[in-house]
């Protein structure tokens, strides 16, 4: 029986990010990632199909959180209000761990076209999850897809601002507040589309 | 001196698509693609960096056309009108060749996670090109990014409808008309975002 490793995923992500940063994505093997994490290759492959997937870790969770938040929004919520509920639900799970890893993660992704492609697909998945959750609320197309794309723009902008924020870590600006602000700006922006 | 092959790119795309369909993306080599196209491997590598890039062929051209159309729109055009001009400019270059290849291209992309990732990045590139062209017109953020994302939604919807259209090929529904209709529906949709 494999030993239960409650934080194995996080350890693989941290180890992979260190190695990708130090020696490059292409030159890093799964064996090296496992060794750095103090875990085995077989444990690695229980969590990820390959090294590319390490940096897309959390995609499914994030997509599910966005969708759950949309689903749980009051029936009276407008499409963008429901998206806002999805963003708030996802934001509530983001920790200082996510915030501190983000700049290095972004640098590694920028260094590899393979990782840029994986990251692009991650964003497509997030938009699709939001679109589906909105459709399930009875929001018609293309309102659902438009609301989901605006939600993704708000997520990206707010997350980047959160990561770049230099407030003391004891009292960082709340990610949920930033998402709320981004979505409000987008709501105002659509009235200027013409 | 290599012989000038005016249609080399198209021949590689057609050959690759046939092979990917017949024997799968993973099991197809560049040598096989070149042989099927009746061209050499070195000619292949003058056009594409690897086999994945064959199916992203046209991305740069498409992004440039979208941006050029936006840049050339009248100064009085609203952000969405400028996006519409970009879509129309790109649509004007699409031929029966693109239309006939599209269903097989979509099937091959759906069969490979690697190709799905490449395709996702292609769409990110198209949105980025439109966003940059809008910013250059003085459209502020996040209006520019919102307009670009709506433009991408309109492009996807209209292109899919064009490919699925079963009108006689002598008088197919014009892609530009479909793009115009999709963008109009999105313009109406944003008023329902709440």
Image (cartoon, coloured by chain):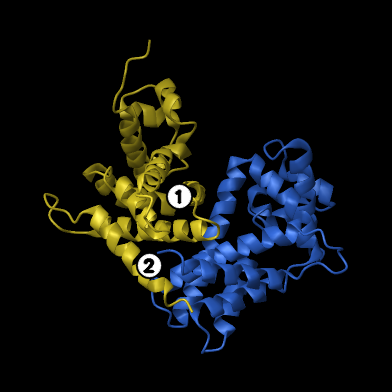
Chain colours: A yellow, B blue
10 Å neighbourhood of mark 2: few (<14), some, or many (≥20)?
Answer: many
Q: Earlier in the sequence, mark 2 or mark 1?
A: 1
Q: Residue at x 39, y 73 (%)?
A: A189
* Residue B90 in the image: above or below residue A140: below
Disc assigned to residue A186:
2
Q: Quadrant of the N terminus of chain A?
A: top left
Is disc 2 in the same subunit as disc 1?
Answer: yes
Q: Residue at x 40, y 64 (%)?
A: B194
Q: Nearer the viewer, residue B26 or B187?
A: B187
State which quadrant residue B179 falls in.
bottom right
Is residue B128 in view? Answer: no
Subunit bearing disc 2: A
10 Å neighbourhood of mark 1: few (<14), some, or many (≥20)?
Answer: many
Q: Nearer the viewer, residue B44 or B84?
A: B84
Q: Which residue is mark 1?
A: A130
Subunit bearing disc 1: A
Q: Nearer the viewer, residue B155 or B30?
A: B155
Q: Residue at x 67, y 37 (%)?
A: B26
Q: Position of residue B152 (x, y in %)?
A: 56, 64
Measured in 3D between alpha carbons, the distance from the residue under mark 2 to the one under mark 1, in whole angstroms, is 16 Å
Query: Could you tell whether B27 is left or right of B36 in the image?
Result: left
* Residue B19 in the image: above or below residue B79: above
Q: Position of residue B48 (x, y in %)?
A: 66, 56
Q: Secondary structure at mark 1?
A: helix
Q: Position of residue B17 (x, y in %)?
A: 76, 48
Q: Secondary structure at mark 2?
A: helix
């Amino acid at each position: 029986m494999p030993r239960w490793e409650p934080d194995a995923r996080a350890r693989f992500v941290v180890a992979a990010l260190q190695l990708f940063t130090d020696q490059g994505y292409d030159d890093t093997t799964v064996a090296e990632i496992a060794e750095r994490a103090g875990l085995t290759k077989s444990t690695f492959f229980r969590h990820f199909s390959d090294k590319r997937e390490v940096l897309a870790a959390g995609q499914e969770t994030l997509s599910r959180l966005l969708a759950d938040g949309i689903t749980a929004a009051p029936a009276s919520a407008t499409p963008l209000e429901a998206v806002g509920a999805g963003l708030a639900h996802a934001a509530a799970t983001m920790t200082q761990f996510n915030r501190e890893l983000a700049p290095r993660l972004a640098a590694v992704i920028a260094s590899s076209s393979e990782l840029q492609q994986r990251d692009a697909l991650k964003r497509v998945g997030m938009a699709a999850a939001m679109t589906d959750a909105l459709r399930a609320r009875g929001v018609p197309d293309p309102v659902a897809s438009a609301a989901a794309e605006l939600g993704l723009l708000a997520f990206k902008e707010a997350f980047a601002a959160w990561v770049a924020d230099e407030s003391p870590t004891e009292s960082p600006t709340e990610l949920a507040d930033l998402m709320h602000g981004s979505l409000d700006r987008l709501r105002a922006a659509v009235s200027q589309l013409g």
